[in-house]
Image (cartoon, rainbow, N blue to C red):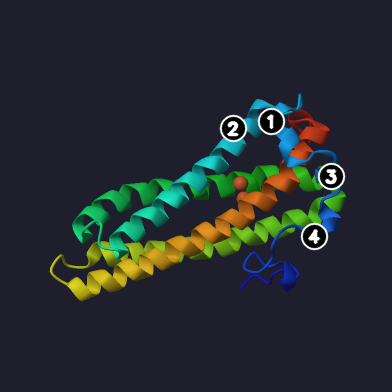
Amino acid sequence: MQMSKVDPQLSIETRTGLPEEWKFLLENYPRDSWSSHSNLGEHTRFWLSIHRHFRMMGSHLVAQSEDYREGRVDGTQFRTQMAPRLQQFLQTLDHHHRIEDGVFFPNFMAAEKRLIKGIELLEEDHHVIDAEVHTMVRVANALLQTRDDDHDGLKRAGEDFATSSVRIVGLLDRHLNDEEEIVVPLMLDRGEIELMSN
Ligand SMILES: [Fe+2]
Ligand SMILES: [Fe+2]
């Protein structure tokens, strides 16, 4: 098992934001200035749009599982709607993490030594999110494999799926927010072409 290099107090499970020591660029490039900044390039805009997509997909998943839990949709309808949406969500998330871990983060660490620890924290977040993805796949498969006439089994599997959906959305919310507050100020400060061609 890989040992975490991250301060346990900064765990994605418990932290409420980035520590001050990694906000020195954010202070110069606050969130409300990003969209109108002349250095905001198309790659950064696209990357932010993927994050918006994850937030939207996550809230749909939670809403769907709550509709099922509250009895507003039946088990068959829920499973039919959930499966393709979940598959697309998890595949896109996996692809996104691979690009960040393999391309973005090494470039960022090389460009700004003062943010190495912050970027390691983002990598660690990916491990925690990926572990929850595995849980989500397991509970989704259990739900899909439960017989239509097994009402107790469907209820249990629906509860497990709803719990996992809420958890992954909470993890993603924390991660996406903190990742944006490290990455976007760096992109704006250095320029995305210069930063990505290190
Ligand atoms: Fe990420
Ligand atoms: Fe990301």
Q: Which mark is residue 190?
A: none
Residue under pointer 3: 27
The residue at 86%/57% (across/down) is: 21
> Gap in Å between the C-alphas at discs 4 and 3?
13 Å
Residue under pointer 2: 46
The answer to which of marks 4 and 3 sits earlier in the sequence is: 4
The residue at 86%/52% (across/down) is: 114
Q: Nearer the viewer, residue 83 or 105?
A: 83
Q: Quadrant of the N terminus?
A: bottom right
**Does dot 1 land on a helix, a strand or a loop?**
helix
Please, is residue 59 above or below residue 13 in the view?
Answer: above
Disc 1, disc 2: CB below 8 Å?
A: no
Decide: few, some or many residues near mark 4? Use Cα within 10 Å; few <14, some 14-19, many ≥20.
Answer: few
**Does dot 3 land on a helix, a strand or a loop?**
helix
The answer to which of marks 1 and 2 sits earlier in the sequence is: 1
The answer to which of marks 2 and 3 sits earlier in the sequence is: 3
Is 122 left, or right, of 68 in this rendering? right
Decide: few, some or many residues near mark 2? Use Cα within 10 Å; few <14, some 14-19, many ≥20.
Answer: few
Residue under pointer 4: 19
Image x and y of residue 156, in percent: 29, 73
Image x and y of residue 83, in percent: 31, 52
> Gap in Å between the C-alphas at discs 2 and 4?
26 Å
Disc 1, disc 3: CB below 8 Å?
A: no
Image x and y of residue 91, in percent: 44, 48
